[in-house]
Image (cartoon, rainbow, N blue to C red):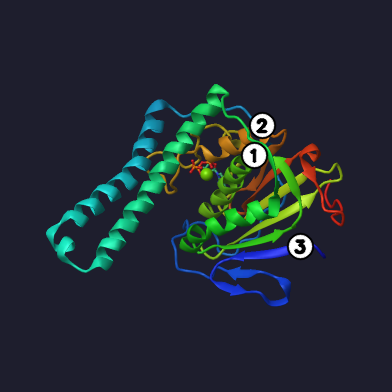
Amino acid sequence: MKSQRCLYAGKRFDRGSGLLSWIAKILRGKGPPEAQAGAKPPPPVGRAQAGASAKVPPRGAFLATMSHELRTPINAIVGYAELLLSPQVESGPPQKRLEYTRLILRSSRELQSLVDDVLDATRVQNGTLALKDQEHDFAELTEMVVRSMHDLAEANGINIVARLVPGIIVTGDPLRLRQVVRNLLSNAIKFSPNGGDVNIEMQRSYAGKLILAIRDPGIGISAQDLNRVFEPFVQVDHGPTRRFGGLGVGLSLAKHIAELHGGSVTLTSEPGKGTEARLILPDTRITWPADRKPTVA
Ligand SMILES: Nc1ncnc2c1ncn2[C@@H]1O[C@H](COP(=O)(O)OP(=O)(O)OP(=O)(O)O)[C@@H](O)[C@H]1O
Ligand SMILES: [Mg+2]
């Protein structure tokens, strides 16, 4: 395949033979106990189309999740700020102050991103989320997201292998589309076992659509839950035994943004085997490089 570039997210950086390889290999992280390392991506069983209807969770469960998610970064910010102001640290080595300041900044950004997600969920509900269209290269956009996910992938012991097709020009809102790719990729990383590979591929359909497929070898989603997870604030694993962080808004935002572009988000999944998430954008928004032929229906 001539015009394809492979991006590996991780620690090794290698520019041999025109490929950019940047391999994340692998810190020991905590994966869900029941997930099998190295499990193959799923065969295409039950596909849920974005937009299936479902109930949002009860208000109490939602508030419990929300306060838990907010409290973690707030506690870190308050704790490290107090340490910064303590006499020992104030008169101690500057490296410690720098380290605590960085931790405060990281937790502040987490908090900012949670609040942004809630505001976006409100915009979706009110129908006030608007696009700022411009032409952009979709491989560059995807690469930016993959690079920004490096730390999360490394912390979870995940390799990201991205096969990027340069020169696909999309007319759409690059900030919002980046958000879609980020939300799908963060799920693939979060719900996969330590040591697993997350694969990203770009395909052209016979109708000229762009398909960005993100496959993970993770815990998967049952057919009945596939109908619910596109709803805002719905998480399969919820309540006091919840193992994964997040508010449950990523997929609903991704679906809404894709639909504003005239596209869609779909999930194909099998419990214990993994999930394939697809962002599909319509041909009217895509200019294909001359040598890129359709490969999928
Ligand atoms: N790749 C995946 N593998 C397994 N389960 C998934 C996957 N993607 C989504 N899910 C399920 O769908 C739920 C909703 O996903 P969504 O991205 O909306 O929320 P979240 O990841 O829990 O939180 P947030 O995205 O707000 O940080 C998840 O909580 C999880 O139960
Ligand atoms: Mg998510």
Above or below residue 14? Residue 36 is above
Residue type highlighted by circle 3: Gln
Query: Can you give x and y, in whole percent of width and height, for residue 279 in the image?
Result: 68, 43
Whole-number angstrom distance, CA of label 2 to CA of label 1? 10 Å
The local secondary structure at tag 3 comes to loop
- Nearest to N terminus: mark 2 or mark 1: 1
- Check whether the beta carbons of the residues at disc 2 and disc 1 lie within 8 A of each other: yes
Q: Which mark is residue 173?
A: 1
The local secondary structure at tag 1 comes to loop
Residue type highlighted by circle 1: Asp
Above or below residue 105? Residue 240 is above
Residue at 33 percent of width and 56 percent of height = 103
- Nearest to N terminus: mark 2 or mark 3: 3
Q: Which residue is mark 2?
A: 260
Q: How crowded is the residue under tag 1: few (<14 C-alpha within 10 Å), some, or many (20+)?
A: some
Q: Residue 181: in sight, yes or no?
A: yes
Residue sitting at the far top: 126
Residue type highlighted by circle 2: Leu
Above or below residue 181? Residue 29 is below
Query: Can you give x and y, in whole percent of width and height, for residue 76 in the image?
Result: 29, 50
Classify the position of the C terminus by image quarter.
top right
Q: Which mark is residue 4?
A: 3
